[in-house]
Image (tube, helix red, strand yellow):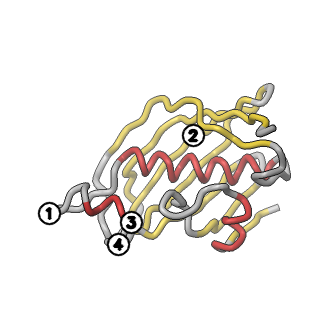
Amino acid sequence: MTTQHDIAEILRLLPHRYPMLLVDRVVEQVNGKYIKAYKNVTVNEPFFTGHFPQKPIMPGVLILEALAQASGILAFGTFDKRPGDESLYYLVAIDNARFKQPVVPGDQLHLYVEMTRNMRGIFKFAAEATVDGQVVAQADLMCTERSTV
């Protein structure tokens, strides 16, 4: 079944809040398979004041964080859990990260994450971020579920 989420539902699905919430909308999600989401990149993002004032560029690590948050939404949805259900999904590895071009204010960062493996509470994802159909970043992500109690 395909699912979509607005910002209100994303706030229920992720523990992140401003300024670290980096997913604005989920346009398609098939639990256990993949998620398509996006982040609207605006000039008033707090990181642009220092990265870089004369030529604002979204830090690559935050592009990876946006992909990781999309992965979290997919994992929570796949196992019908929510943050605060005595567990969280933690990012534990990033492999094969590549950055192809800068992301700047005014861009819409499209996030595509595919769940490639689920074994004993460790999940692997193939993740890609695009702007205007061009790949800007890609990586293999790994997360695990941990108890919060």
The residue depicted at 67 percent of the width and 65 percent of the height is 10
What x and y, as percent, mark residue 32? Answer: 77, 46
Please tell me which of labels 1 and 2 falls first in the chain: 1
Mark 3, residues whose alpha carbon is within 10 Å: few (<14), some, or many (≥20)? few
Q: Comparing marks 2 and 4, which lies closer to the viewer?
A: 4
The residue depicted at 58 percent of the width and 61 percent of the height is 17
Residue 96 is left or right of residue 49, and the answer is: right
Residue 55 is left or right of residue 23, and the answer is: left
Residue at the spot of label 1: 54
Q: Quadrant of the N terminus?
A: bottom right
Q: CA distance from mark 3 to mark 1?
A: 23 Å
Q: CA distance from mark 2 to mark 3?
A: 20 Å
Residue at the spot of label 3: 132
Nearest the camera: 51 or 27? 51
Residue 130 numbered tag: none
Please tell me which of labels 2 and 3 falls first in the chain: 2
